[in-house]
Amino acid sequence: MYTLKIQKLRNQVARVDNTLEKVNLLTQAIRIADENQDIEWGYELRLDLISEEIDLAFSTESLPAFAWILQAYDENPERFNEEDFLWQYKWMMAELYDNPAVSREQIEAALGDFEQRLIRNGYGKRAIYNEELSDALAQKDLAAVEVALTNVNALQRDDMSDCEACEMDAEVSATLLQYGYAPAVEKALPLIEGQFTCSHVPLRTAVNLAYEGYKHGYAEQADRMAKLAETEVFKKEKDSAILISAIKLATYFSYTDLGKSKEWIERFLPWADGPENRSMFQLACYVCEAMKNFRADEHFMLELGQQHNLFQGKTSYTASELAGHYRKLAHQLAERFDQRNGNNNFRNQLKAL
């Protein structure tokens, strides 16, 4: 019976540690549920898939799975609970912002739909403002950051707000843009001291403060932050969602310890095998910056899968080759995002390099 096959696959998911393998098993189970037109199993399995794929550096299955969930609920509201997927809606909004093929009109429509669902379930708009702040920070748009942060802080927290650690991490990034390094470090103290944590905080905060600390002339403070970041990376060395933080830390090391920078790039860059999105833009910028600190003929040993956008059928790539590849990719993505957003924010980030 097909339900036994689904249950066996779910049991396998519970036994394996590899997140990608979990996603593949859930995809198989979803296929079986769909072939048998079992909407309840299809709904539950897709929620499981989204919750697992959030722990990967790049997601490919979550958006179509979530679109299916929305349709299933809207067509059968008596069979499901809308609150079951509101938290996942936050993640999907981030996915929409990440994708340069998604228009601003589509993003605004999704935000409007999300707002309606939040309000009719008794929640406020703070979760929406969290996403707008995240997008403003990614664009390094100071005016948009100030507006979004004001909107976030004007509303009470509720159960759909980002966790306190993530909200504080976003405020640290905003403070860096608005007021500089020293106030940002002060703002970050509760995170650095471990008073507030989540799956990727304080890692993200420590990496940011190491990188920016070096740039602002706070070498000693930056070194302490880098040591904390290393400790956090080792706690999550199998979690590919740390990819951008790991590459950003490798960029910091390219100024302070070239050997360690090379080691980290060789270790983590093979994970960058996802779609061309906002995270890939950030990664490309960091790799380009790091390569400036190596000799052009420095060789990097990289074991890449065929789906990796750098894959050329070899295992050794020079710093010059890495810089050329990722510079081109960063420019292409900057052009696409700026065209989507109607500004020059991503191209300005490239100029700053």
Image: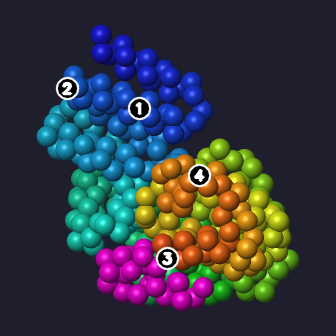
Task: Between label 2 and label 3, give the one nearer the viewer.
Answer: 3
Q: Earlier in the sequence, mark 4 or mark 3?
A: 4
Query: Residue at point 39% right, 80% down?
Result: 335
Residue 337 within the magenta-colored segment of the rendering: yes
Q: Are marks 1 and 4 in contact (CB under 8 Å)?
A: no
- Residue in the image at 46% along x and 85% along y: 347
Name the residue tied to disc 3: 328
Asked whether 167 or 308 is in front, the reply is: 308
The disc at residue 26 is 1
Residue position for label 4: 304
Nearer to us of marks 2 and 4 is: 4
Q: Nearer the viewer, residue 284 or 62?
A: 284
Residue annotated with mark 2:
37
The local secondary structure at tag 2 comes to loop
Q: SS at mark 3? A: helix
Q: Nearer the viewer, residue 289 or 232?
A: 289
- Residue 54, position in %: x, y? 48, 48
Quadrant, the C terminus = bottom right
Q: CA distance from mark 4 to mark 3?
A: 19 Å
At label 4, which amino acid type do we have?
A: Leu
